Image: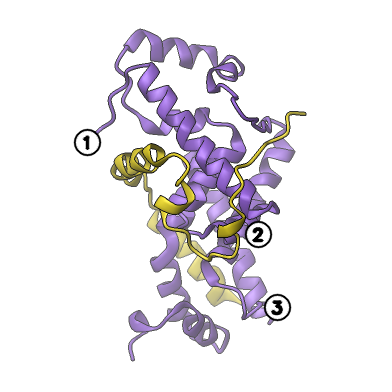
Chain colours: A purple, B yellow
């Protein structure tokens, strides 16, 4: 069986035994999901690359130290490490506000706390078609769930475990994320790229 | 602090992966909306540089 045909657990075992190619395959297999998840949280390529690198350094050290929990899945574990490093970064920078939501919460109530020049640009252009910017306008918990669900392909149980909330809360945050995205798109008559 | 209120989805609590039409069953239009934006979300996928990947692999080999 070639490395490409092996599942993640088999590759992890091979890597622990000294097969460096197994690590290369794991990275190639999951790098887009992991990097995109980090990037959409920090919104900066250079910072995302730093955190991506630090994430895998932690992964490597943990595997080499024999401290990997074999019952867990590899990708959710790596995403959790990346997620925690993003949180650590924002704590150090003291930049990212944490906003929770409530039933009936209107996304446009929070637009005022974001960069006003960016909002002005959106209004002036009248035909904003970058979903990425709309995602960045979501409250951080909603953005987080959307990113982990869509890009990390995590189950809601995995998302709940990673973010230390109940499954109901994770589900609710995804629902609110989609609801708020739709409100922004329809109310501003925005056109998404096809 | 504002407290989040979530929908009652106890019957789905133990599901590992939930079909979108189930978890969004209260409002199926949101499920349809999610399906409609998925292609655009996919366009946002990014790749790390080859350089950073090589740094990681080099770090592993150095141990």
Chain letter of disc 1 in the image: A
Closer to the eye: label 3 or 1: 1
Q: Quadrant of residue A47?
A: top right
Q: Which residue is mark 3?
A: A67
Q: Quadrant of residue A60?
A: bottom right
As drawn, A143 above or below A2: above
Chain letter of disc 2 in the image: A
- Could you tell me which secondary element the residue under label 1 belongs to? loop
Q: Quadrant of the N terminus of chain A?
A: bottom left
Q: Which residue is mark 2?
A: A161
Q: Which mark is residue A194?
A: 1
User: Earlier along the polypeptide chain: callout 1 or callout 2?
Assistant: 2
How far across and how far down the image is residue B29, in percent? 37, 37
How far across and how far down the image is residue A117, in percent? 49, 12
Query: Quick check: do tags 2 and 3 share a chain?
Result: yes
Q: What's the CA distance linking mark 2 and mark 3?
A: 19 Å
Identify the residue at image location x=47%, y=59%: B18
Q: What's the CA distance linking mark 3 and mark 1?
A: 45 Å
Density class for disc 1 (Cα within 10 Å; few <14, some 14-19, many ≥20) is few
């Amino acid at each position: 069986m070639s490395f490409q045909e092996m599942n993640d657990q088999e590759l992890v075992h091979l890597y622990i035994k000294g097969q460096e190619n197994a690590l290369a395959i794991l990275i190639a297999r999951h790098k887009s999901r992991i990097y995109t998840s980090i990037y959409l949280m920090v919104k900066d390529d250079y910072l995302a690359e730093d955190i991506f690198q630090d994430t895998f350094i932690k992964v490597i050290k943990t595997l080499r130290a024999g401290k990997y929990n074999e019952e867990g899945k590899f990708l959710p574990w790596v995403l959790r490490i990346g997620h925690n490093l993003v949180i650590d970064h924002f704590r150090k920078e003291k930049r990212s506000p944490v906003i929770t939501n409530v039933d009936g919460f209107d996304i446009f109530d929070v637009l005022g706390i974001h960069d006003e020049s960016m909002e002005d640009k959106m209004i002036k252009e009248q035909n904003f078609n970058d979903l990425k910017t709309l995602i960045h306008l979501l409250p951080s918990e909603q953005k987080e769930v959307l990113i982990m669900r869509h890009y990390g392909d995590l189950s809601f149980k995995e998302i709940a475990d990673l973010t230390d909330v109940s499954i109901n809360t994770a589900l609710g945050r995804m629902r609110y994320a989609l609801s708020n995205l739709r409100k922004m798109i329809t109310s501003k008559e925005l056109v998404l790229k096809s | 602090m504002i407290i989040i209120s979530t929908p009652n989805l106890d019957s789905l609590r133990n599901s590992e992966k939930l079909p979108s039409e189930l978890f969004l069953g209260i409002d199926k239009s949101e499920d349809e909306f999610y399906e409609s934006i998925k292609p655009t979300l996919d366009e946002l996928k990014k790749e790390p540089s080859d350089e950073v990947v090589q740094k990681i692999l080099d770090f592993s080999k150095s141990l």
